[in-house]
Image (cartoon, rainbow, N blue to C red):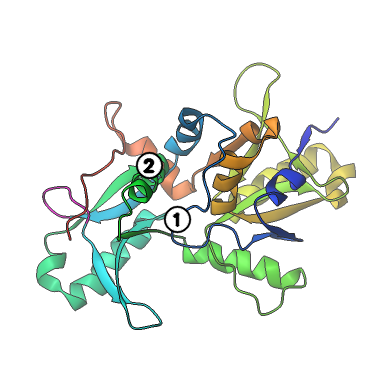
Amino acid sequence: MKSFIRLGATLGIAGSVFLAGLSGIGNLPGIGNLEAVALPQDQIVKKLQEVPVFTLTNPKGEFVVLSRKNNESKPISQVGFFISKQDAQKFLDNRLKKENPQLASTLQVRPLSLADYYKIVQESKKKSDSVIYTLVPSQAQVASATSMLNANGKKGEQFNGIPLFVPKFKKDNSYLTIPLAKGNERFIPFFFEKEQAVALLDQFKKAVPKEAENTEIQVVDLYGVMEALNSSTDPSINKIVLYPSRESISFIRSLTPNQSPSAAPAPKK
């Protein structure tokens, strides 16, 4: 018997739902309206704590604020947090070292957690901080998400946001669940890599071949999921588990037991 949880309506609360995912939710930067809290903040932080993100810091451990102009030619101060450590390193090596080699030579890629990013954004809203804190997705996964949209009737549309990939059942709009520990409790995996979701779904198809035609991969926006964690009253929302990419899992395993990604001091402007 398949195990599943219906969350389509719950995630739909956060924004407009279309076949392959959610759109118009939590436009960058920020995480949308976080006033109504469904889960206690400590539970939200715990869910986000397992996912590393990567940013650039100076020798003092301070974020380095980069300036750019928006479409109206107005200056914007921005700090980038990368989902991929490799992308963060490439940004430092291939861009900053060319634009400002003196500054770039003093910078390093530093790991934090997605929970740290969340708390930084929350705190900046309280202080009306003018600095924009932006999550930068893996471009390879954005390409996969865009391809999925185009294949499902959204031709020419670009996926905007941080893609998460979720194995699901077509007929009842429910999600595949997995056990994380001993016992009967099951959880809904949201993957940062499409390949991880495909691998899990392939395992399920082999175990339950009669359900193969009833399954698919759905792509949703991380910001929409974070919005739902804050605003949905559906108890099933607590079943969501965020799975880091394989690159990030390797990074986590490389840490010594007393190491963990931690927040950096306030940004240096």
Which residue is nearer to you in this view: 111 or 15?
Answer: 15
Left or right: 186 in relation to 65: right
Q: Is residue 231 visible?
A: yes
Q: Which residue is mark 1?
A: 30
Rendered location of residue 201, percent (x, y)? 72, 46
> Secondary structure under badge 2?
helix
Residue visible at 87% across and 52% down in the picture: 213
Q: Which residue is mark 2?
A: 119
Give the amino acid type for the residue marked by disc 1 in the picture. Answer: Gly
Residue visible at 55% across and 67% down in the picture: 160
Rendered location of residue 123, percent (x, y)? 34, 44
Residue 25 image-quadrant placement: bottom right
Residue 263 image-quadrant placement: top left
Choose the circle earlier in sequence order: 1 or 2.
1
Which residue is nearer to you in this view: 24 or 108?
Answer: 24
60 over 235 or under it: above or below: below
Magenta region: which residues?
Answer: 58-63
Rendered location of residue 158, percent (x, y)? 60, 73
Q: Is residue 202 visible?
A: no
Crowd band around label 2 with a 10 angstrom C-alpha radius: few (<14), some (14–19), many (20+) = some
Left or right: 110 in relation to 220: left
- Label 1 and label 2: CA atoms lie apart by 11 Å
> Secondary structure under badge 1?
loop
Rendered location of residue 105, percent (x, y)? 12, 64
